[in-house]
Image (spheres, grey):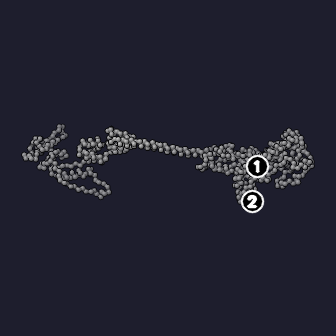
Amino acid sequence: MAIITLLDGTAFTTTVDPTTQRHHVECDMCGKAIILTVNAHPRAMQDHRGSKSCREAERKRVRAQTQAESAAASLLAAGIQAQPNAQPRIRHTPQPTPGASTSHSSASSARTSSQRPTALHIPRLSSIASTPTTPSQSRPHSPYSAVPSTHAPSPARSGTCTPSHLRPPIPSLFPENEDDDEMQSPDPPDLPHIDDDILATGAPAAAAPETTAPKAVECNGVVVEWLVGSAYSTYAFRMHDIHELPWRPVAFLNDRWMRLQAEDCLTSRPSDHDSCARCHAIPLSARYREFIKRAKEASSHTPWEYLNFTQLMAVARRIQEKYHKALIKINNMDRKLARKSKLLNDHQRLIMLCAKNDVQSLRRLLAVWLRRGANPNMIIRQVERAPEGLYRPKQGYTDRDIDVAFLARALGGDRLLYALSHSSGLPSASTVNRRVQIPKLTPCIGAPTVQHIHDNISSMFHPDVKPAPTGELYANGLPGCSLCIDGLALEPKCRYHRASNSACGHRPTLMSCALSNVLNTSDNVLSRAGARMFEGQQAQELLTIPVNPNAGSIQHLAVFAPTSHDTS
């Protein structure tokens, strides 16, 4: 045997099964035998008392006891009204003392001298219902005072375990044997006499003798501490609407302490207890522990009706964040679709413009505006203006464009280059002069000299004219050049060479053709050559040389070259 104590202070005495060596205990609420562990751990008993089956059995037992008490009270009232002037027959049975045998011995069957009482004390029904009757009372039983209390505390509240087979039976209101009618019982020594008028009118009698049992008071529930957080925001009130919980909150003392009351509360409790057994078992039940666990941390798949206000707010915030992200994605997708559709329309317009119009320098036009970061609408407007001559790009010339313009100028002159620049978009003459370094050869007026040869080679292969090649192939040195001279170009045409300020032509006999001034030009050119002065229309060549162009008036010198057949 062992004694176990639950969390509410209730003590139970266990019995050991000799076969399994496990402890057995009987529930004080429903009378069911509970099997404990070998070490008599009270967890199984604690869980059983908080289970639904135990509460249902206790509810049935209390209902049956209440019905029996009501029936006894009705029979008592009916018997008093039926015989208002008759003297009731009383059989006195002394209450057994603790530790004595419960069987009816000779003390219960002994009769005293026949003497009828002149008055009998009958307690009021209210006092019967409010005064508990326990086996420990030493007051003798009578058919009128042994009615069980309606709100008698269960053994769980008194701190002792009393099995159902040890509970006092409800005494009978009438004698068991008709032979007892002839017997006379003496009055109980502790009951005063009651007059007949009191029995007839039901007037209140003398006060009942004092008892040591605690009085029953109203049960207002059990006070529990809510450790999850603020009870106003972390308690799942919605659970009481959608599910039948075995308790209900009746008061909130503050944000951490509240009062809970069981749905099947006994409505009364002993004066030395804070609550009845039903309410006291709420914090110890498995369902309440699960309720607390869900309030602390709920899983992601928990239905919303099981969540408290704080958890619902967290779920709402998560949904709001997802909604905002999805809304941003949708808006971005709408903008992308609108932009793509607009670009598609712009591309179609550009293709149609290029197909219907011969746009000059379309490549350079697109390159210029794309480099400027223009949008498709601006590019399309410029493409529309180009065929009408309202816009012409002036940038983006490639080396090929410069070479084509240089050849057009060299072969056809500046006028051809001007026409092609307006019709085909070639660079102008100024652009060609700025971009192209044209080599300049110095002609030899007389016989070629070494200085002339060096000057011409430098003008053709100078780094400013022809840059040196670069790269890994030329890391060790620059390649050489081969110069081949194939014949001489003789130009007998008499002309003026501005760079040397000389008159050049096929006159190798001239010692010097330099023109120093206006006065000695004729002597220097003609007298040394021994030629005669002829008229202009009879000369083979006529050269007009501007002399002293810095002077205020333009002065010219006419140089005539005689014909080859002239000997004079």
Query: On the rendered structure, is 517 left or right of 39?
Result: left
Rendered location of residue 204, percent (x, y) = 84, 40
Q: Residue furthest front?
A: 356
Judge by depth and name the residue closer to the eye, 171 or 137: 171
Rendered location of residue 135, percent (x, y) = 81, 51
Q: Look at mark 2 in the image and give the residue it sits on.
A: 16
Judge by depth and name the residue closer to the eye, 296 or 302: 302
SS assignment at label 1: helix
Query: On the rendered structure, is 141 left or right of 438?
Result: right
**Classed neighbour count for the residue bearing mark 2: other residues with Cα under 10 Å, few (<14), some (14–19), many (≥20):** some
Q: Residue furthest top?
A: 553
Q: Residue at x 37, y 39 (%)?
A: 381
User: Is residue 239 visible from the viewing direction of this image?
Assistant: yes
Q: Amino acid at mark 2?
A: Val
Which circle's residue, 2 or 1, is located before the other in the chain?
2
Q: Residue furthest left?
A: 568
Query: On the rendered structure, is 471 left or right of 35?
Result: left
Rendered location of residue 280, percent (x, y) = 71, 48
**Classed neighbour count for the residue bearing mark 1: other residues with Cα under 10 Å, few (<14), some (14–19), many (≥20):** some
Q: Residue at x 60, y 48 (%)?
A: 302
In the image, which is nearer the foreground, mark 2 or mark 1? 1
Gap in angstroms between the C-alphas marked 2 and 1: 27 Å
Rendered location of residue 447, percent (x, y) = 15, 51
SS assignment at label 2: strand
Q: Look at mark 1 in the image and give the residue it sits on.
A: 61
Q: Residue at x 86, y 47 (%)?
A: 174
Q: Quadrant of the N terminus?
A: bottom right
Task: Say the numbered circle drawn on residue 381.
Answer: none
Q: Residue at x 11, y 43 (%)?
A: 539
